Amino acid sequence: MAKRLTKRQANVFVYIYDYIQENHYPPTVREIADAFDIKSTNGVVEHLKALAQKGYIEKDGFKSRAIRPLVNRDAVERILNGQEEPAPTRSHARRQGTHAAAPEAPHAKLRVLGRIACGAPIFAEENFDEDVDVDPSVFCRGEDNVYALRVRGTSMIGDGIMPGDLVVVRPQQTAEDGELIAAMIDGSATVKRYEKRKGVIHLIPSNPDMDPILVRPEDHADFKILGSIRGVLRFYK
């Protein structure tokens, strides 16, 4: 049977559990410290050690976001409400031949927002009718606003981006020279390498048969960086 928690330990567990439910990944030690106004992260580490020793969480000490609850939230709520008996840990339930309700972080999915050209720009249709069963944190850890766009065209085949692929985009409004980006031009979207030379933005394809798109200073009002390309997904039939 899991050992009884102190009220502070129970509150830390509930915070971790709720954070995972909302964000799909665990909080860092610093985030826990800030949430409870604990000045030293060492104090949080001690709470996490106690939660692990008492059978409420698993934690990989070498990773910043590697906390996994082993019991459900209701079990710890009972402790906070003054009830004496906590729910069994997963290992205890296994010994008793029962299934513990140890929660997993909700399985996040990558949202596909529309289409984007690798060639001449095309309109990026924001349709929310497709999700891909891939956790976005694989491409950008700790980011819950990354999304995917489906590729059309062949201008980026030199970077291994083929028609039908999904490019994963981390939203941002600026770019460094050489960065692979998704951009909007005159209401149309495209994927290219970004370079800026003497005030002129060059959107460079990796297909040698295609020319760069030039965005001159007078055209900047019609140009917008959508984000950085963080990865490519391809599915084979």
Image: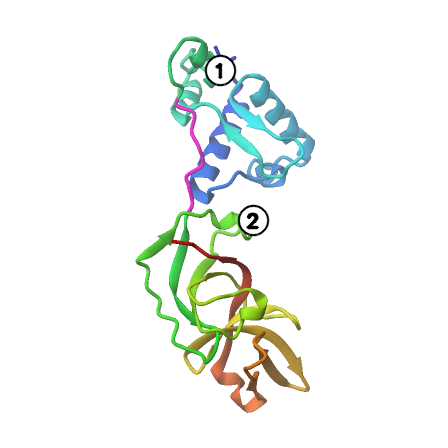
Residue 107: in magenta span = yes
Seen from the viewer's position, the closer of residues 221 and 95 is: 95
The amino acid beneath tag 2 is Arg
- For the question of whether residue 37 can be seen, the reply is yes
Front residue of 77 and 172: 172
Task: Point out residue 137 in the picture as x, y percentages from the top left corner.
Answer: 52, 48
Q: Which residue is mark 1?
A: 91
Residue 91, compared with residue 210, is above or below; it is above
> As drawn, is 202 to the left or to the right of 133?
right
- Look at mark 2 in the image and give the residue it sits on: 141
Tell me if 61 is positioned left or right of 27 in this view: right
Q: Say above or below: 172 vs 9.
A: below
Residue found 45% across the figure and 73% down from its top: 153
- Give the vertical position of 15 relative to 181 (above or below): above
Q: Give the SS element for disc 2.
A: loop
Whichever of labels 2 and 1 marks the residue nearer the N terminus, that label is: 1
Within 10 angstroms of label 1, few (less than 14), some, or many (20 or more) residues?
some
Few, some or many C-alpha atoms within 10 Å of disc 2 (few <14, some 14-19, many ≥20)? few
Q: Quadrant of residue 60?
A: top right
Q: Residue furthest bottom?
A: 218
Residue furthest top in the image:
96
The span shown in magenta is 101-108
CB under 8 Å between callouts 2 and 1?
Answer: no
Is 144 positioned to the left or the right of 129 in the image? right
Q: Quadrant of residue 121?
A: bottom left
> How many tags in the picture?
2
Secondary structure that dominates the magenta span? loop
In 3D space, how far apart are the residues under numbered discs 2 and 1 (Cα atoms)? 30 Å
Where residue 134 sits in the image (x, y, percent)?
44, 48
Q: Amino acid at mark 1?
A: Ser
Question: Outermost residue, left direction?
Answer: 129
Q: Residue at x 64, y 77 (%)?
A: 195
